[in-house]
Image (spheres, grey):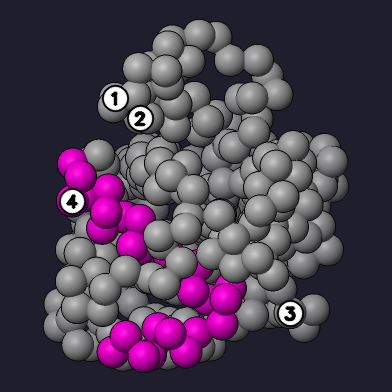
Amino acid sequence: MRSTLEALSPLERTAWNDATCRATLLAQGRASMIDTFAIWLHDTCGPSPASAKLDASVAIGIAARHQAVDGLARQVLNRLEAAGMSCEIWLMGAGLDMGWAMGERPAGNAVETIREFDLPGLIAAKSQLSERFGASPKHSLTRNAVDLADPSLSLPPTERPVLVIAEGLFDHLSEEPRGRLLAALARATPAAVLLADGLSRSGVKFDNRRPERFTGDNQLPFAEPPENLSAFHERLGWSTRGEIALFPEMARIMGERNFFWRGISALPFPAALRRLYALYHLEIGDALP
């Protein structure tokens, strides 16, 4: 089974890096999450080849992102459930996360189905691995092999509102494919909430000095985001409803074991540092409560 993962492209293997980080965080007791698939994957296939050279901040960023995404997702799903509305969850760049399908992440009673979208090689590998894993999904699940950066990108239409979750995706999309994805989402659903994390331009510039420490491959740098994200989203019809600074939360997590970071996390963070890495909450359409 490990050979299946080793055959993935460098971009696809970032999903393996993330799963290894989640399993390691759980083994260290440093993450408030449940992820039985990541633990099984680590025990069965071992860590990703790049994991030993990844910067420690990668795993900490995954923990901070996971917590923030789940908190916002729970709020959105509670809104829909209180209004008696059903929805779909679309996972863009689904990676090797099985938590939503297995009910380990907060997909509540409002959710009718979960759709995963990712590169064909990764979707095929995940399907094979999850079959060997053997757990039955708690929600209706479809997997869609698609290149989210493809200029001809189209998404299946739905009549329901959609909660779109894009963890670790937007840093690999430059402005043009990012815009196409947002436009495709707007065409596919009457209303959507998008939760997407991303680095600022300063964060991308810093990480791209040695991309192998953050992506696992020195030939896989992060893409530069639009200069003014709010204005960029607004031009495409998406309103920015919130922004959660993840870097201060990362400092807090690191401070649990490191005195230096404990001191840093206690200080007020300048705006540039707060935007270094953030989770964005965007909405489009009039059908949301």
- Amino acid type of the residue that numbered disc 2 sits on in the rendered structure: Ile
Q: Which residue is mark 4?
A: 27
For badge 4, the amino acid type reads: Ala
Q: Which region shows up in magenta?
A: 1-29
Q: Position of residue 39 (x, y in %)?
A: 20, 64
Q: Are marks 1 and 3 in contact (CB under 8 Å)?
A: no
Inter-mark Cα distance, 1 to 3: 42 Å
Residue 73 percent coordinates (x, y): 40, 45
Among numbered discs 4 and 2, the one appearing first in the sequence = 4
Earlier in the chain: of badge 4 and badge 3, it is 4
Residue 2 forms part of the magenta stretch = yes
Question: To which residue does mark 1 refer?
Answer: 256
Q: Nearer the viewer, mark 1 or mark 3?
A: 1
SS at circle 1 = loop
Q: Return the mark for residue 223.
A: none
Q: Which mark is residue 150?
A: 3
Secondary structure beneath label 2: helix
Q: Residue 271: where, in percent of width, then height?
A: 68, 19
Residue found at x 26% / y 73%: 46
Above or below 23: residue 284: above
Q: Nearer the viewer, mark 2 or mark 3?
A: 2
Q: Is residue 289 left or right of residue 30?
A: right
Outermost top residue: 267
Q: Answer whether labels 1 and 2 touch (C-beta < 8 Å).
A: yes
Residue drawn at (83%, 63%), measured in percent from left and top? 176
CA separation in Å, label 1 and label 2: 5 Å
SS for tag 3? loop
